[in-house]
Image: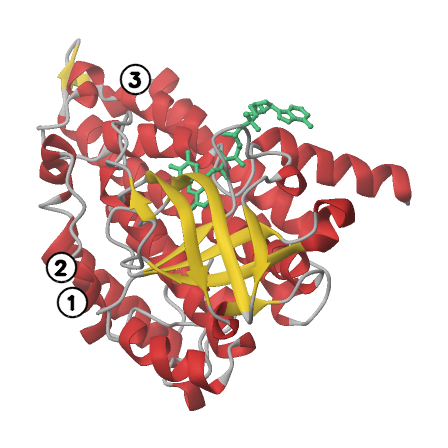
Amino acid sequence: MNVNAGGRTGELVNAARRFAADHVVGAAAEWERERRMPVELFKTAAEAGLLGLMVPQEAGGHGLGLKQTAAVDEVLAGADMALAFAFKVHGNLAGNLARNGSPAQIERYLKAMLAGEVIGAFLLTEPRGGSDATAITTRARPDGDGWVLDGEKAWVSNGAVAGVMLVFAQTDPDRGWRGIAGFLVDADQPGVIRQPAYHVLSGHALGTCGVTFDGVKLDRGALLLEPEAAFKGAMRGTDIARIGVGAMAAGMMAASLDAALAHTRDRAAFGQTVADFQGVQWQLADAATDLEATRLLTGHAADLFDAGENATVAAAHAKKFGSRAAVRTIAQLMQVMGAVGFRHDAGHPLARHLASAKMAEWLDGANEIQNLVIARSLLRD
Ligand SMILES: Cc1cc2nc3c(=O)[nH]c(=O)nc-3n(C[C@H](O)[C@H](O)[C@H](O)COP(=O)(O)OP(=O)(O)OC[C@H]3O[C@@H](n4cnc5c(N)ncnc54)[C@H](O)[C@@H]3O)c2cc1C
């Protein structure tokens, strides 16, 4: 990814760098200690022009392509992946709304989302399983002019603070994935029960939790994605998110490599710097190769997507390789830092990034599901 790109992208990348330096780098370790989601930063990010990147300009967004957006994702995740992903989930819903929403839905939510006043969430996964998304059991039953929603969702990013939720629910179990529709649900509606945020290894800035729907009445205007279109729409959103995860993996590797280079050049052992040992240099070089490969795979997938071509397999490669490489590489860079690499409170992000890299191995489909996508394409051709 060219994070030094000129023009509009360059401006936004610079804005992302300033935002990260001023609001994230020095604070993220504290969010983890406090297990806190910095919800106030959505408005700050909106003011910095970092929300609604892919929302068309005529709808109030920036109208960027995915390649340009990924350059911003890389910078933000270099500071904190959980916050970068929180913005991604929010931005994806804003984009979805701008593309598919009725005038009334756009009027009701989009402006407030772009201002960071209302936060969005995407609810597909359920407690009984996330990989087989066609098997969801949250049910939307026809009721007069609208529906009644019952069920439970798990792993809702932004769930702790979301004001509007895109909930995927089965309208007709006999139709399988074709019966799944997507509904916009206000979080303060009666029957929407937000569970406490999960305690996880790291990434509390993502505010992940479960949400229960108990007899929630939805009117006709709540339907954003019709049955049949909904599942395809969810998969398109997944391609965007997977490419974003690839870019975020690159951002975490780049920041970790910078920290390891600075530390090993400064640290002395056996009469020389740690960076003078060839064994350490090879580990730094391997990290640089993983970073380069992740950027190339991610950039290629984003190019395909922006050209209107099918990017599903390329997105699976980028997400799988990037997240696996990040787990391996950041652990290796932690090793060359010595024991100080293991600390949260030593002014570097490696421990937080290592935990977020692990999180990335499940985000938008476990890496085994990426293999399923890739293997299907191999056997089909
Ligand atoms: C931090 C975080 C945030 C998330 N945010 C969201 C969100 O905002 N919205 C949302 O809808 N979901 C979200 N998810 C859920 C995520 O998409 C799921 O975790 C993922 O799809 C895997 O589902 P599961 O965890 O239920 O694993 P399961 O489906 O229970 O699978 C368990 C394991 O089995 C293996 N496996 C499963 N199927 C296969 C197969 N066919 N072949 C080989 N191996 C297989 C994989 O190793 C997998 O990890 C989030 C997850 C995390 C960790």
Of residue 380 and residue 275, the one placed in the foreground of this image is 380
Helix, strand or loop for disc 1:
helix
- The image's colouring method is secondary structure
* The disc label shown at residue 40, or none: 2
Instruction: Report the Cα–Cα distance between label 2 and label 3.
Output: 35 Å
Q: Residue 79's x, y, as percent?
A: 24, 47
Camera-near label (2 vs 1) is 2
Please tell me in which quadrant of the rendered image residue 87 appears: bottom left
What residue is shown with label 3? 335
Residue beneath the point at 88% across and 37% down:
379
Residue beneath the point at 47% across and 57% down:
1
Residue beneath the point at 62% across and 41% down:
133
Of residue 5 and residue 306, the one placed in the foreground of this image is 306
Residue beneath the point at 22% across and 66% down:
45
Q: Mark 3, residues whose alpha carbon is within 10 Å: few (<14), some, or many (≥20)?
A: some
Residue 242 visible at all: yes
Relative to 220, is 285 above or below? Answer: above
The kind of residue tagged 2 is: Glu
Helix, strand or loop for disc 2:
loop
Instruction: Report the Cα–Cα distance between label 3 and label 1.
Output: 36 Å
N-terminal of the pair, mark 2 or mark 3, is 2
